[in-house]
Image (cartoon, rainbow, N blue to C red):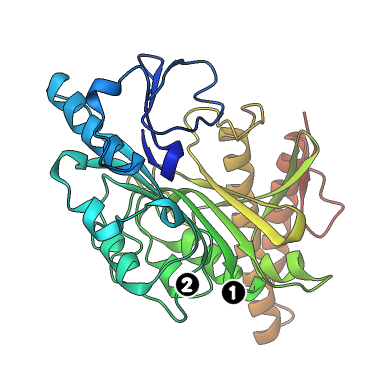
Amino acid sequence: MLSLNGESSYIHFPDEGVTIFCGSQQIESADIVTSEIVTNLDIAPWLNPKLCAVENTIEVCGKIRKMLNPCPCFDISLHLENLDSLNIQKILAIPHLMPSQIIEVFSSEIDKADLDLIMEKGSDALRVLLYVKKFPDSYYHDHAFKFNSFQYDDAHWVKIEHLLSFRCRTYVTLNNCPFTPVDLNRLIKHWINGDADMFQHLILNCIDSRPTGFTEILIDGLVTLRTFVNGRSLHLFAIAIPSLLRRYKLLSCWRGANNRITFSAIPIKVKHAHHNMPPRIGKLEYQILRRLNSKKKLQDEIVEKRENNPRDRSILQLEEKIQEIDRKLIMKGVNLDFQVPILPEL
């Protein structure tokens, strides 16, 4: 990790357990606190007194990469307010700082030109974390959603259509989102009926502040199973049509405080572990949802037949099939006494 942050700039080697500070100030973090600290005094012969701490850190990084040739990719962390005489354009043009696996940016705001430079690197091999409080108004870039994983702290410009275009993303976090529960309902429907995996984890911090009715609108018209893990209420959804192209056949949705919505796509061949949750969700829940989907189709068929011919004798046969499905669901532990079926926490 290369962190460029004024006099607190450093290079961190997690595998070796070493952190090199090239400036006069040292900071503490969970990663650094357990590592061996090398100060600017320890490497004084390597430092150029005419250069600032940021520039010296970049120079030292270049020397180390030559010594460790071939050197693994660096993660880069940029604090825009503390880059001294440098800027994003100059830093991203330095050959020995590329390629990188992660680019982090910390700032109160960022201008469009600098943001475009980052977005132009859009690639499945790169993770971008933009801890920027304010993006340019109505911002957009064609590569903004091409990163393997990304976090945008100001996602006011992101539209639901952008989310629907996701393919095989890993971790995505969007803060200050403009999405309504109607938008999220559309997202879930797209996930259910899609022909490819969209994401593994998606966290949306929505600005919609309605006090009630959010969850009801979010799941409206959808076949869902409610379950509990460590006291958290989750809604589960299953893909509409089994497909070898869909590795993740279950989707969990958890609504936290302040309309923080967390989606996790779940493979059913192995028990899935949520963050800070035991691995309890998997094949059983998928089988239950498949039966609930079958039940919904039968119910829709009954409604159609009654509209055409209330005395249609096949209606009774369909009702008997529904009763059989209910019997099997109850045997699996599903509580059908609520509008949304519930699988109690085991």
Q: In what quadrant of the picture does the N terminus appear?
A: top left
Q: Give the answer, above or below, for where 39 lies relative to 132.
A: above
Q: Residue furthest bottom?
A: 308
Q: Which mark is residue 178?
A: 1
Judging depth in this view, the residue of 139 and 162 nearest the camera is 139
The residue shown at (21%, 35%) is 59
Judging depth in this view, the residue of 238 and 266 nearest the camera is 266
Q: Is residue 5 visible in this depiction of the protein?
A: no
Q: Give the answer, above or below, for where 75 lies relative to 246.
A: above
Cα separation between marks 2 and 1: 8 Å
x and y percent of residue 120 in the render? 24, 63
The residue shown at (41%, 15%) is 17
Q: Is residue 16 visible in this depiction of the protein?
A: yes
Question: Label 1 near label 2: C-beta < 8 Å?
Answer: yes
How many marks do you count on the picture? Answer: 2
Disc 2 secondary structure class: loop
Q: Sequence order check: which comes first, mark 2 or mark 1?
A: 2
The quadrant holding residue 185 is bottom right
- Horizontal placement of 170 versus 330: left or right? left
The amino acid sitting under disc 1 is Pro
The amino acid sitting under disc 2 is Val
The quadrant holding residue 40 is top left
Q: In what quadrant of the picture does the C terminus appear?
A: top right
x and y percent of residue 343 in the render? 76, 41
- Horizontal placement of 46 versus 164: left or right? left
Judging depth in this view, the residue of 318 and 236 nearest the camera is 236
The residue shown at (70%, 73%) is 208
Q: Give the answer, above or below, for where 23 lies relative to 223.
A: above
Judging depth in this view, the residue of 252 and 20 nearest the camera is 20
Q: Which mark is residue 158?
A: 2
